[in-house]
Image (cartoon, helix red, strand yellow):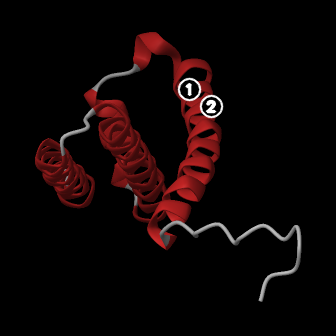
Amino acid sequence: MKAIGQMPRPKSGSTFELLSWFYMRVSGLLMALMITFHLLWMHLIVGLDNINFSVVADRWMYPITGTLWRVFDLLLLIFAVTHGMNGIRFSIEDYVHNRSWQLFLKTAVAILLLFLLFIGSYIVFVFEV
């Protein structure tokens, strides 16, 4: 029995949506920090005139520092692609009202997400000079 003036409990959303919302905030913050470091490193330390294929190859060549750079680049790739695709998913939910089209577009986005993560990860792990 409800007390007088007591509001009914709002229905809770899905856990996936809550985690998705939280992920957008965390990944956005991490990307801002990582991109700032990346831009400062490449523009101020390396220099724009010096950036070419051999700079990236040299960065990834050494066992310890190369592994750290590969992990950094892979995390930046994962955060950027998943953050962007999650944003596209939000836009699909906001602007596409037909459920069939939503399902089709979300499936296409998921396939594109997996493809980009696979190709990017493959390049980061398999790349050799």
* Residue 129 in view (yes/no): no
Residue 25 is labelled as none
**Residue plotted at (64% across, 44% down):** 29
Q: Residues within 10 Å of mark 2 (few under 14, many from 20)?
A: few
Q: Nearest the camera: 7 or 16?
A: 7
Q: CA distance from mark 1 to mark 2?
A: 5 Å
**Residue plotted at (36% across, 35% down):** 91
Type of amino acid under label 2:
Thr
Relative side of 100 to 43, left or right: left
* Residue 9 in view (yes/no): yes
Looking at the image, how many numbered discs can be counted on the residues?
2
Residue 40 location in percent, x, y? Answer: 62, 26
Q: Nearest the camera: 123 or 33?
A: 33
SS assignment at label 1: helix
Q: Nearest the camera: 21 or 27?
A: 21
Q: Residue furthest right?
A: 4
Relative side of 11 to 49, left or right: right
Residue 39 is labelled as 1
Q: Quadrant of residue 38?
A: top right
Is the C-beta separation of discs 1 and 2 under 8 Å?
A: yes
Residue 5 location in percent, x, y? Answer: 88, 67
Query: In this picture, is 53 found above or below 18?
Result: above
Relative side of 93 to 25, left or right: left
Relative side of 60 to 23, left or right: left
Query: In this picture, is 22 found above or below 9?
Result: above
**Residue plotted at (89% across, 73% down):** 4
Q: Residues within 10 Å of mark 1 (few under 14, many from 20)?
A: few
Residue 36 is labelled as 2
SS assignment at label 2: helix
**Residue plotted at (41% across, 40% down):** 87
